Image: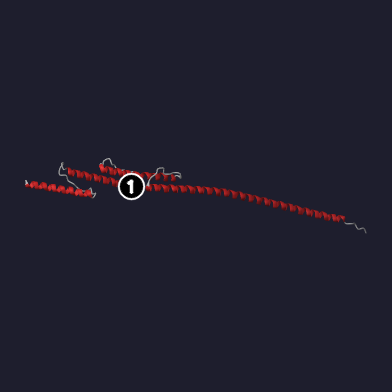
Amino acid sequence: EVGEVAASLDAIVRANREVATAARALAIGDPGAVITARSAADETSHALRDALAAIAAVTAAVRELAAAAAEGELTHRADASAAQGAFHELLTTMNAMLDALARPTEATARVLGAVAAHDLTARVSDRYPGAHGRTHAALHTALDQMSAAIGDARTLAFRVQRATADITRGADAVADGAVAQARGREALMRALDAIAAAAVVASDAAARTRDTARPICWH
């Protein structure tokens, strides 16, 4: 009987040590401790195993969320339905945090998609606090400046086009004037040639007249 009692006490001590080891592991966030239940009635061991399993499940869910976020996948969410109490609240809070990150990020992506499609009027309609709000304000300022620069470029292009048309008209007028001037010079030269020819004819006629008018000498 004494031996049986001693063996029972040893089993109780070992079990208590396992429980203490598991409790210390829980205290430092390590859900890997192993607990062996002494029987179906060992509620303490069963409860600790359930606690370790719950912590392991929550840890795995958080790791999945972090891995997805690191890959830029902000739509992944943890399944909080299987968790209870504080664990359920933790996973629900993590999901809500990702929602708060994803919404302004998606809004920014929609605006940039519109800009890629040559629409500079798109803006983030909702208002977000903190860093998201500052990012959207900077984005809107950049789009405003781009729109203004494009407007200035269009105005300058219109002015250049109008000046080019004026220069072209001026050049055409100068060319027309030069053609008219050349034609005038040609007409003047023809008139001078005609006058010179007439002068020659008149000179010849005068000479003949003089010859005809000379007195006849009779011998």
Name the residue located 48 percent from the left edge and 48 percent from the top edge. Answer: 148
Of residues 69 and 18, the one nearer the viewer is 18
Percent of width and height locating residue 141: 44, 48
- Disc 1 crowd rating (10 Å Cα; few below 14, some 14-19, many 20+) is some
- Residue lying furthest left: 1
- Residue 160, position in %: x, y? 55, 49
Q: In front here: 143 or 207?
A: 143
Q: Residue at x 78, y 53 (%)?
A: 198
Count of numbered marks? 1
Most extreme residue toward the top is 81
Rendering coords of residue 116 (x, y %): 44, 46
- On the rendered structure, is 112 left or right of 7? right
Residue furthest out toward the front: 129
Answer with the quarter of the image where residue 115 lies: top left
Q: Secondary structure at mark 1?
A: helix
* Residue where numbered disc 1 is placed: 69
Q: Amino acid at mark 1?
A: Ala
Residue 182 rendering spot, x and y as whole percentages: 68, 52
Q: How is the image coloured?
A: secondary structure
Viewer can see residue 111: yes
* The C terminus, quarter of image: bottom right
Residue 76, can we see it? no
